[in-house]
Amino acid sequence: MERRVRWQGPCRLRLSVGALTPWTLQPGEDVASVEHETDRRFLGLKCLVGNTPLLAIDFSYRGEQRVLYAKAEHINMTGSIKDRMALYILQRGYAEGALQPGDLIVEVTSGNTGISVAAIGRAMGHPVTIFMPDWMSEERINLIRSLGATVNLVSTEDGGFLGSISRAEELAASSDRAFLPRQFSNEDNIEAHAKTTGPEIWWQLRFRDLLPDAFVAGVGTGGTIMGAGRFLRDRRSSVKLHPVEPSNSPTLSTGHRVGNHRIQGISDEFVPPIVDLDSLDAVIGVDDGDAILMAQKLAARLGLGVGISSGANFLAALQIQNDLGGDAVVVTVFPDDNKKYLSTDLLRDEPVKPGYLSPDAELLGFRGFKRVCHTCCDPAECLEGLPPDIVAAEEALPPCPRRIGAGNT
């Protein structure tokens, strides 16, 4: 029988995810009804994750007019780039049968991933337990709790981040049905950005006849730099890929925890297993005080309420642009919003120290590049341009009207 789908408006199309494995059914349920509900929930969530604007930030640096590019990841569903990875890993879990309805989801986080996993996990009907170091901001802890997840805080004496990982593994092992996303070692973390963040950056630039010269990103798990970087380098082999770390706590450079820093979400005591430093270019260090000042500027001057790591990424991108030349196309990400840091030094006066770059960066404004056809016309997400009648599932999508005459095929 010919399977047909009906256009129901953007993000409302119901498609069967054939890769899903059979469920443990509840009395009165059948496989089709459960699969349909799962499809419906995932499609709804996908509307809130990814395809973020690429911001072209105009500024002057020591009198020279410059532009840097940054993905506005702070406008994702829960306010961070981690929504991409959490959604993708949970979808893969369903598709592979490792995650089934009602399973407990257990994850370790410095904050953002825990928030993302809690939100998406609860939206899919799962109990969620999060382990995290106890020195993270109160906003992060309370946000996770507000989403209905259980939070277990681990002190420095009990192992901090590494202790959180051990406790999460122990809980999962003692549970009948538990799913561990394992963000630090899960290759699907990389794949999430290779399939979404990287292509979005590439086509948002290409649509405007631009090519990336470098991509820089802070390393928490490393999924962003490894995944988006892989896609960009596959398209243009000369692209420089620079991981970012706090100069106050250079974990990537030393291979272990050293010092302390205030850029929550990166440099989490160890080099994540999915990070291949040999495949990347030089690590860029940014002082946490300089990052705070830059994040404060982005908010106060441009209205971009972003977190401290966004300030760090901007300054790292500036360093690379200084090396490559003022007209180099350097791209980064603004990983999260500032609402998770209202109790931190982000809202306090930060002294300027010698060597800081932020005082010399005068922000002038920004332009936003929206999604483009190449990442927009996904039949499982957005069918803009599809006639409002029944279309056979195997029929090729018609050309998106936005692409007609654009010369970008």
Image: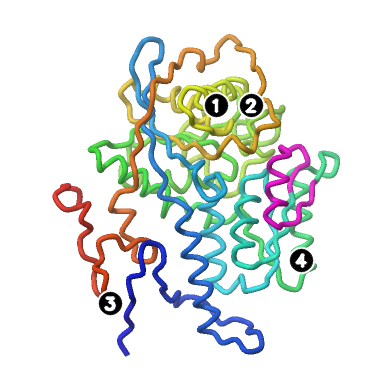
408 sits to left or right of 293: left
The earlier-in-sequence mark between 4 and 3 is 4
Q: Amino acid at mark 1?
A: Ala
Residue 158 position within the rendered picture, expressed as x and y whole percent measured from the top left: 84, 44
Looking at the rendered image, the disc whose residue lies closer to the viewer, 2 or 4, is 2
Q: Position of residue 103 (x, y in %)?
A: 68, 70
Identify the residue under disc 4.
173
The one of 312 and 225 positioned closer to us in this rendering: 312
Mark drawn on residue 26: none
Q: Secondary structure at mark 2?
A: helix
Name of the residue lying farthest toward the right: 157
Q: Secondary structure at mark 1?
A: helix
Q: Which residue is mark 1?
A: 295
Which amino acid is tagged 2?
Answer: Leu
Q: Looking at the image, tell me whether mark 2 or mark 3 is earlier in sequence order.
A: 2
* N-term-proximal mark, 3 vs 1: 1
- Asked whether the beta carbons under mark 2 and mark 3 sit within 8 Å of each other, the answer is no
Label 3 secondary element: loop
**Residue 343 in picture, x, y percent from top left:** 70, 31
Contact? badges 4 and 1 (CB < 8 Å): no
Q: Which range of residues does the magenta coloring cover?
A: 132-153
Q: CA distance from mark 4 to mark 3?
A: 48 Å
Check disc 2 and report the residue beneath it.
346
Residue type beneath disc 3: Ile
Q: Nearer the viewer, mark 3 or mark 1?
A: 3
Spot occupied by residue 116 in the image (x, y as percentages of width and height): 60, 52
